[in-house]
Image: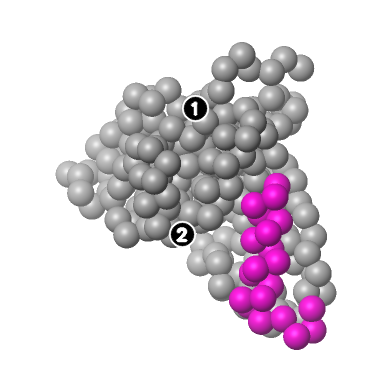
Amino acid sequence: MVEPLSKVHIAVFVSGGGSNLQALIDASKSGLLKGEVVLVISNMRKAYGLVRAEKEGIDSFVFKIKKYDTPEKANDDLLAKLKKYDIEYIATAGYLKLLPLNVVKTYKDKIVNIHPALLPKYGGKGMYGHHVHEAVINSGDEESGITIHLVDEIYDHGNILHQVKVPVKKDDTPDTLAARVLKQEHLWYARILDKLIKGEYRK
């Protein structure tokens, strides 16, 4: 297993606050992640993840399909931007849209997502953030956790790389459970992405 000589270029897709984006940036600075976040993309112009990118001096891009004449032109432009920045790996961090098929195919087995539950439970369209934790608590499950997985053309569907269990306490609210789950997200996302970059998950 040979480590890359230089840091690979990573793009991160966000829709909200971007705390996992920040965790990846911090891990890159510390050397924990053998990759560098060079581009941040969001479907939301007011996403705080874009502010984080600006503070870190990282280029960003707001990607809205409706700004283009056709979805095909939008997707082609997105892929062109990824190529322009020599992107080698993609991490989605609270990104609420499906990635375009041309991007998924081009970066097959090089796109990761982190989900705040133990997939295949509580995954799929509409299952994100507060909705996930609320569903877990309402189900009566005694444990939740995080899932880091490869991304394909279906929501929360790709090959699972790593899971960490988090106990659900009797007095938990969606917010208290979310806080404990998020700590594990920040702890593990960069580590697993680093393993992927190093080739530890290749078949």
Q: Residues within 10 Å of mark 1 (few under 14, many from 20)?
A: some
Q: Is residue 75 left or right of residue 3?
A: left
Which residue is at a point 75% across and 85% down the rendered structure image?
Answer: 171
Say if residue 136 shows up in the picture: yes
Instruction: Specify start and end residues of the magenta stretch as a single range.
Output: 169-188
Quadrant assignment for the N terminus: top right
Q: Foreground residue, 190 or 152?
A: 190
Q: Looking at numbered disc 2 in the image, what kind of residue is underneath it?
A: Gly
Quadrant assignment for the C terminus: top right
Q: On the image, which quarter does residue 46 sit in?
A: bottom left
- Residue bearing mark 1: 9
Classify mark 2: helix, strand or loop.
Answer: loop
**Residue 136 inside the magenta-drawn segment:** no
Res. 139 mark? none
Q: Main secondary structure of the magenta part?
A: helix
Q: Earlier in the sequence, mark 2 or mark 1?
A: 1
Q: Looking at numbered disc 1 in the image, what kind of residue is underneath it?
A: His
Which residue is at a point 65% across and 46% down the rendered structure image?
Answer: 189
Distance between mark 2 and mark 1 Cα atoms: 22 Å
Q: On the image, which quarter does residue 2 sit in?
A: top right
Which residue is at a point 37% across and 58% down the rendered structure image?
Answer: 47
Q: Position of residue 77 (x, y in %)?
A: 28, 34
Q: Is residue 185 left or right of residue 71?
A: right
- Residue bearing mark 2: 17
Q: Position of residue 156 (x, y in %)?
A: 60, 53
Q: Is residue 105 above or below residue 41?
A: above
